[in-house]
Image (cartoon, grey):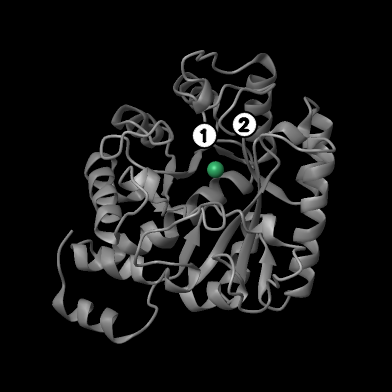
Amino acid sequence: MFFCAQMMYNIRMSAVNFRIADCHCDTISLLGKKEYHFGRRNAAGHIDLPRLIEGGVGLQFFAICTAPYTQHGHARAALEQVSRYRRCLEENGPRLASLERAGDLAALEEGKIGALLALEGAEPLEGSLELLDIFYRLGVRALSLTWNHRNLYADGVGEETAGGGLTRAGRRLVRELSRKGIILDLAHLATRSFYEALELAERPPLVTHANSRRLCDHPRNLTDEQLKELAAKGGVIGLSLYPTFISGGAEAGLEQLLDHFVHIAGLIGVEHLAFGSDFDGIEATVNEIKDASQYGLLPQALCRQGFHPREVEQMAWGNVCRIVRANLGGEAQ
Ligand SMILES: [Zn+2]
């Protein structure tokens, strides 16, 4: 890390200098709502196409989430979300590109925004690897085993005291994710589940949205020990903009979020850090970044903090692309 005055000047002078890859949002939950249109700027929510462009976002993970309860079954709820997502991709085709193979990253060099479909909580699979195959064919390329509760696959952070870890179905699923080339997302898992899934992973995993537990003692955040083990597997953590995970309170400032970057970078290195906003899944964000249109302020603030622009580029973009390549391309390593 060093401070480069000329570079800082250049960064201040232009609105967006860094492309951003964001590992988690719940924007799919807005699709199909009457007052919301993804292709236009909306008063509601955090993300739509104009705001992604304005914020410099070049790659966005979109999560399907049916947890913890759903009226007509998880598989149906998830498929309906896939339907709305795919229609959105079609309607915004010239600017959005579905990211399903490592080779699809090339389209992002031509100015398209990559969209990666994720499953947050594996309930929609209902224990069937054939359903996993269907969701794979529909474009799902990242998956977390559970949300905060216990399901067929694993215990989430809400079950920390039970701490049952992974079930046999969970272990089989993790192995199948590595085989198929689906990114394993370790967010929301209870500590024991986290370590068990990490041990089974044959490709570098991602924690799509969490922060440092050392700085903010919330069960959704990762301890230094967990972060070290994640790094040892070549994994990456996307830091969330959720005040509850940053300051522990209802509000947090950008400076407090920077503390999480500094702490984790010092512990495991910048090559294991990324952004995972949780936009449209949280009721509040850091004060200075109200929605995706202001996302460009984060890389600028990291530069001001003293990170080298090359390090900022890794955290904002490069590390997530590395995880995508390692998972979506070729055989497990
Ligand atoms: Zn979540």
Image quarter of residue 6: bottom left
Residue 252 horizontal side relative to residue 159, left or right: left
| Residue 208: mark | none
Three-letter amino acid code at the position of disc 2? Leu
The quadrant of the rendering that contains the N terminus is: bottom left
Position in image of residue 77 (x %, y %):
80, 44
Q: Is residue 32 above or below residue 329?
A: below
Q: Is residue 123 above or below residue 89?
A: above
Between circles 2 and 1, the one closer to the viewer is: 1
For the residue pair 166 and 71, the one nearer the viewer reads as 71
Going 72% across and 32% down the picture, which residue do you hit? Answer: 123
Mark 2 and mark 1: span between their CA atoms?
8 Å
The quadrant of the rendering that contains the C terminus is: top right
Ligand 1 sits in which quadrant? Answer: top right
Q: Reading the chain from its start, which is encountered first: label 2 or label 1?
A: 2
| Residue 188: mark | 1
Q: Is mark 1 within 8 Å of ligand 1?
A: yes
Q: Is residue 246 above or below residue 109?
A: above
Q: Is mark 2 within 8 Å of ligand 1?
A: no
